[in-house]
Image: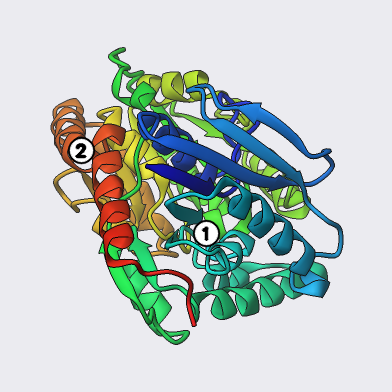
Amino acid sequence: MRVAVLGQYPLDEERILGGVEAVMVPLVRSLASLDVHVVTCLPGLSDQLRATRSGSPLHVLRRGRLGRATLHVRDVSRIVRIVTSLAPDVVHAQGLGIYAAAAVRCPCPHVVTTHGIVFREAEFASGLAARWRGCMDGRYERLALGRVRNFVSISPYVEQEMARIGGVRGRIFRVENPVDDAFFSQHAEPEPTTILYAGRVIPRKGLLELLRALTEVQTSVPGVRLRVAGESESAGAYFEACRKFIAQHALSESVSFLGPLTVGRMAEEYARSAVVVLPSKQETAPVAVAEAMAASRPVVAMRVCGVPHLVEDGSSGLLVEYGDAAALAGALTRLLCDQGLRARMGQRGREIAEVRFRAAHIARQICEVYRTVIETGATRGR
């Protein structure tokens, strides 16, 4: 079976910059027994043919400028041309952007997995330019969705939100995101006062709310440390607001900004942490939560969007209402002060992750989706 997988794929598989990349790398690696070709479209590069670490051909196309203003016509056409030349049995797009738009135009069966809910994420954009980009991307999301005939849903939350913009007209296959095996392989003892925040420093992710809660946690847990793993350049004003808050509340010795980390380093950070926290306002099926569970670490997160479909409140972690800094501080303090509870919740998270997120297991499910789509002969949307 020849498969063309379309999406944002990293040129360096150790340096993952987003959730889609974190999903694509273990998925492609686990599908290596198939004839897999990966197609990605990146700015600032010449067209080139590389290979993934697992040996699959990686077709890199240069992404054009002013794509949004032209509804990405040039980029989509170039992706369609290369996929057509590969003559795959099925094409699998990751995301409801240009890759989905290309997949539904290809002369072969298509499957589309969405990850972020663009029109929801756009609600948290700040600045005129960011709001315009979000508006354009949300519009494009709606246009692409209308032509998708085979849709992989990674969370019930996805189906709920897709219904708000017209719904999925074709078949829905429910398959969750895979987690890289590296996160299952760490067995170090955690540092009992270390909290890990794994994510970009942007308003939607809620780091500022976490910092407010941290000032309260300090009163009960002296020596508490927060380690922030993720890029902080894309929302400079927000990052500066976080740094200002840290300075004003004497948190400089308690908070460390690590920047984006390699997969290996990220796995080590999960292993050293006592608790992983996700204070986001909006999340679909956050990879950070699944990775924390794979690493046997309890999660404290907001009861929003797709998060409750991952975290068993009171069993694998604790959920609190968004905006309630006192509740967030209380949940973190409770776990930091109770080693036995942390161990039990971490173990339960690991049990769930073994069943739901192992890459090999997800790959088997995806292969079954491919076979079903190919056998029924479903091709492009009409």
Q: Amino acid at mark 2?
A: Gly
- Determine which quarter of the picture holds residue 33: top left
Please name which of the two marks, 1 or 2, marks the residue nearer to the observer.
1
Cα separation between marks 1 and 2: 27 Å
Which residue in the protein does label 2 denote? 349
For the residue labelled by badge 1, is the local secondary structure a helix, a strand or a loop?
loop
Measured along the vertical axis of the image, is residue 121 above or below residue 46? below
Task: In this rendered view, identify the residue nearer to me: 261 or 161.
Answer: 161
Q: What residue is rendered at 33% in x and 27% in y? A: 274
On screen, residue 376 versus residue 322, left or right, reads left
Query: What x and y, as percent, mark residue 289?
Result: 36, 43
Mark sitting on residue 95: 1
Q: Is residue 61 visible?
A: yes
Q: Amino acid at mark 1?
A: Gly
- Residue at the top extreme? 188
For the residue labelled by badge 2, is the local secondary structure a helix, a strand or a loop?
helix
Query: What x and y, as percent, mark residue 189?
Result: 29, 13
Query: What x and y, as percent, mark residue 128?
Result: 81, 73
